[in-house]
Image (cartoon, rainbow, N blue to C red):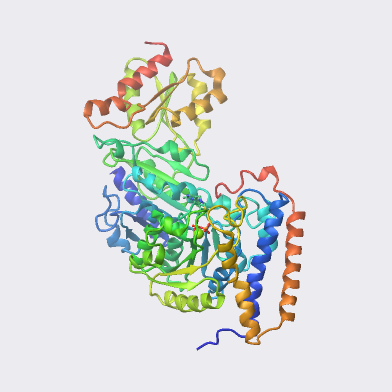
Amino acid sequence: MLISYREALNQAMREEMRRNSRIFLIGEEVGYYQGAFKVSKGFVEEFGPQRVVDTPITEAGFTGLAIGAAMAGLHPIVELMTMNFGIVALDQSVNNAAKIRYMSGGQLSVPLVIRGPGSAAHQLGAQHSQSLEAWFCHVPGLKVIAPATPHDAKGLLKSAIRDKNPIIFIEAQLLYGTKGDVGDGEYTIPIGVAEVKRVGHDVTIVAYSKMLLLALEAADQLSREGIEVEVIDPRTLKPMDLPTIVASVKKTGRLVIVEEGWRFCGLGAQVAESVYTAAFDYLDAPIQRVTGEDVPMPYSRPLEDAAIPDKPRVIDAVKTVCGRR
Amino acid sequence: MMPRMDRSDGLFLYRQMLLIRRFEEKSAEMYALAKIAGFLHLYIGEEAIAVGTIAALRSDDYVISAYRDHGHCLARGSDPGHVMAEMFGKTTGLCHGKGGSMHLVDAPRRFMGGYAIVGGHIPLATGLAFATKYQALDLVTVCFFGEGAIPSGQAHEALNLAALWKLPVIFVCENNRYGMGTPAERAIALYADVAETARSYGITAERVDGMDVLAVRDVMRKVVAQVRAGQGPLFIEAMTYRFMGHSMSDPAHGHYRTKEEVEEYRKRDPLLLLKQTILSSNLGTEADFTQLEREVGEVMTTAVKFADESPFPAPSELYNEVLAE
Ligand SMILES: Cc1ncc(C[n+]2csc(CCOP(=O)(O)OP(=O)(O)O)c2C)c(N)n1
Ligand SMILES: [Mg+2]
């Protein structure tokens, strides 16, 4: 079945909410408005306002409420209108959700999904275009997932909802309309398992979320130029499936990491460190990173384009690690 | 009307307060001996609030608190030995030594924790209440916090959500007149009537003498019945005073308040007030109090011995309970 990323998320939540009445969706405009990006289309009609809870604009309040509800045995899905607003609730996710299990010596748990779109769309300005996954990945006690395709989005969201931990599930506005095959029937995808999205032997590219699509486009073009790229999507950013990445690097000897987030202390720096530690002797060239530029996102289109990784930059990085520039 | 107290009841309330008092004194002693480290906030002077409030609850109601939490935990019935062991950082502690003084949790007693980000646990309380209402359980949630949390945004977000959704939560503001050293009148616009904050959200709020355990219990019995019956949240401002410094690094009066002021408040010591009432209404004798002192003294000796003799957690415990399996 060919469906959009948005519909995939909708199906995942719908199927899980039908299975388990303890699951509820809470956030701004998730009910009668059907979600700011229409992800929860038809939900309030099917599940009622008790389980599809429209909130006021109070991210710290409703994220904290969801954490409390999780401590008391419910399984909330918090929709953040965008991840940028998650900053307002960061105290709740970092100081409470991530720590309650540990601080209580395992007495309490917080089964919770916090989901919404991260990264830039088009010209939304500095406050609405951020890729904050590295912030969340830094915090012990959280799992972080950022699927790129409808198939992965559905399978991973279902797993996230069934998980017993607080999970940050990062979507992307520019992915909601993209289509892909999700097959028929129910399935889940295990958290923490990467997927080789394209097999190649010359260079490995690690890319996730929107950047996966960019990496695949670049790989197509490079193939025509005689460079066969292996593209790996970690899908889960934490815990990350490093063995799959390392195995690929051992085969290709070259690695390019693509991420939209800021370069300094970005996720790619961590991946590079892990690969250097595990496979230094296999590397034929220094690892290259293609990242967002270290600036607040500008509004103007040419400036915005300059701040976000694009295909030429990915291709350039691949050629650099191949010594073909 | 139910008599305010009979003999066994009066002596029970006194014993609970005495246990907290002696526990706190012991804690200070153990801190001086470096058996306890880090932050240690004593509840001395404020015992009537925890004891009076929790005496009005059922054992399956939820209780959550800030970092000055020993009193609430003990009033809930937690074993003093396990509480002390937690403060010693021992593996037999309530949270296996991973929480410490500020983060006591006793899930079987529905003591859902002490939290150390001022204001940050108040949304959790609304979530516990949301969960009980969602499941149509007739439980109430009590949330203790200091008056210092009142100006925080998270307190306001929680009050609004609780009022908006008529959540069965009772906010108990322990107004001991100071944050660390800042008096309420320099921190809270409505310092003269903190409960007004809650009224501005349409929440019924009243003030109670937090030094009078019977007054606290009376008002809580009334309020708990109302909240349990589904009338929505309530707010209690309990007027109190801490006899000791803010934490162990702070002397009893310091620069921000006078010795005379502390002495003045000590005349209304909650233990003293209850003892006088019991004696003057012939519900008990000096011999009863001597007996209680002996009993509680033994409990504390056992508790300290237990904590002292318990092992520290093995280093291999470090990574346990970060995530649920
Ligand atoms: C968000 C936040 N800011 C600052 C602190 C540091 N701090 C710890 S206790 C405290 C005073 C709180 O006073 P109050 O809420 O009245 O509680 P009390 O100590 O009087 O019981 C402060 C400022 C903190 N823990 N959290
Ligand atoms: Mg105070």
Query: In x, y percent, where is residue B219?
Result: 48, 77
Q: How many marks?
A: 0
Query: In x, y percent, where is residue B253?
Result: 58, 57
Name the foreground residue: A239 vs B105. Answer: B105
Q: Kindly give the residue lying farthest to the bottom in the view shown.
A: B1
Residue A247 seen in the current view: no
Q: Is residue B312 left or right of residue A307?
A: right
Query: In x, y percent, where is residue A66?
Result: 42, 56
Residue ID at (52%, 42%): A140
Q: Indicate whether A167 appears above or below B78.
A: above
Residue ID at (36%, 37%): A148
Q: Is residue B175 left or right of residue A301?
A: right
Residue ID at (57%, 50%): A102
Q: Indicate whether A221 appears above or below B184.
A: above
Name the foreground residue: A324 vs A295. Answer: A295
Residue B190 seen in the current view: yes
When asked about the image quadrant of residue A135, the answer is: top left
When asked about the image quadrant of residue A121, the answer is: top left
Q: Indicate whether A297 appears above or below B272.
A: above
Query: In x, y percent, where is residue B17?
Result: 63, 70
